[in-house]
Amino acid sequence: MAAPSSFTIPSHNKAWVYSEYGRAVDVLKLDPDVPVPEVKDDQVLVKVAAASLNPVDSKRMQGFIKATDSPLPTVPGYDIAGVVVKVGSQVKNFKEGDEVFGDINEVALEQPKRFGSLAEYTAVEERVLSLKPNNLSFVEAASLPLAIETAYEGLERTGFSAGKSILVLGGAGGVGTQVIQLAKHVFGASKVAATASTGKLELLKSLGADWAIDYTKENFEDLPEKFDVVYDAVGQVERAVKAVKEGGQVVTIVGPTTPPPAIIFVLTSKGSILEKLKPYLESGKVKPVIDPKSPFPFSKTVEAFSYLDTNRATGKVVVYPFP
């Protein structure tokens, strides 16, 4: 149960919904009359201000995790920023009016929420949220949670630490842009190399990459230099293992195969990671990276998915403003 709210909360709201699996352009529909979700004891109700899209949203919509998905119909979306408008009875850290951000699906691929972030309101467990950094807009905050938490957890799993070198594959993507920054500015990497296409190399350097590799011109695995860690954000793990030093680690977030010494993981969303990284966000050492075509208005969410699915976005694709 939640205490009565001082906000006026409607019983129904607008939400993007799909009732069968497929591409967004074929299956995602705007429903103006979806019930606003009930708030459980450990949840808050968030009035969504902005949401960002992730490749997992598309994969889920296309049925790739059908075996472990929650039942259809589904309101998609993992990443949100917004305002708390109602608080469950056991919630300790948030109150009405708080501006929050987070990845609302604690375990990304196992029974993710049927009612995600692409709606006017969504119910979210307290433990996956953090207070929004004051210096970030809702658009900037919404771009971060899944990507920055994935970047952080991957670096932690490899035991990355100060003085180590790293190669980031897919340095200009949502996760890659955060891996570069965290490796350099949070973990203290001795050298950060990253791959991208020709037009994105300057971006990589601006984020902290010491060496920007143009994958259209060179094969990173053929370069003489090898790295303590290779972070594969694109699904090139067979090549990644050839670029790592003896005794080094490869971490990938794109399956299906992981030859040794590679490890693959799926993010567990935690508000505590966002809290830990907040000082770096507030100081500007670590920045959101948002694709220049963003934000897409709520009414153009299908177009936002079509753009995400080109795999050409730089940083994150964000949906804003909401109704």
Image (spheres, rainbow, N blue to C red):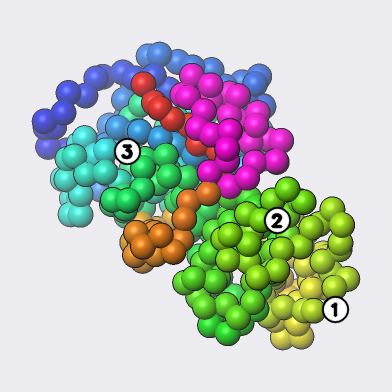
Question: Residue 315 at x, y = what percent?
Answer: 58, 47
Question: Residue 71 at x, y = what percent?
Answer: 51, 32
Is 185 placed left or right of 88 in the picture? right
Q: Which amino acid does label 1 sit on?
A: Pro
SS of the residue under disc 3: strand
Badge 1 is on which residue?
224
In the depicted view, which residue is nearer to us: 202 or 53? 202
**Residue at figure coordinates x 70%, y 41% from the top left:** 311
Badge 3 is on which residue?
82
In the depicted view, which residue is nearer to us: 88 or 176? 176
Question: Residue 113 at x, y = what percent?
Answer: 44, 39
Is residue 109 visible in this depiction of the protein? no
**Residue at figure coordinates x 72%, y 78% from the top left:** 227
Is residue 216 visible in this depiction of the protein? yes
Number of marks = 3
Badge 2 is on which residue?
201
Q: Distance between the residues labelled 1 and 2?
A: 20 Å
Q: Are marks 3 and 2 in contact (CB under 8 Å)?
A: no
Q: Which amino acid does label 3 sit on?
A: Gly
What residue range appears in magenta? 290-315
Q: Is 65 located above or below residue 198 in the figure?
A: above
Q: Is 102 located above or below residue 296 in the figure?
A: below
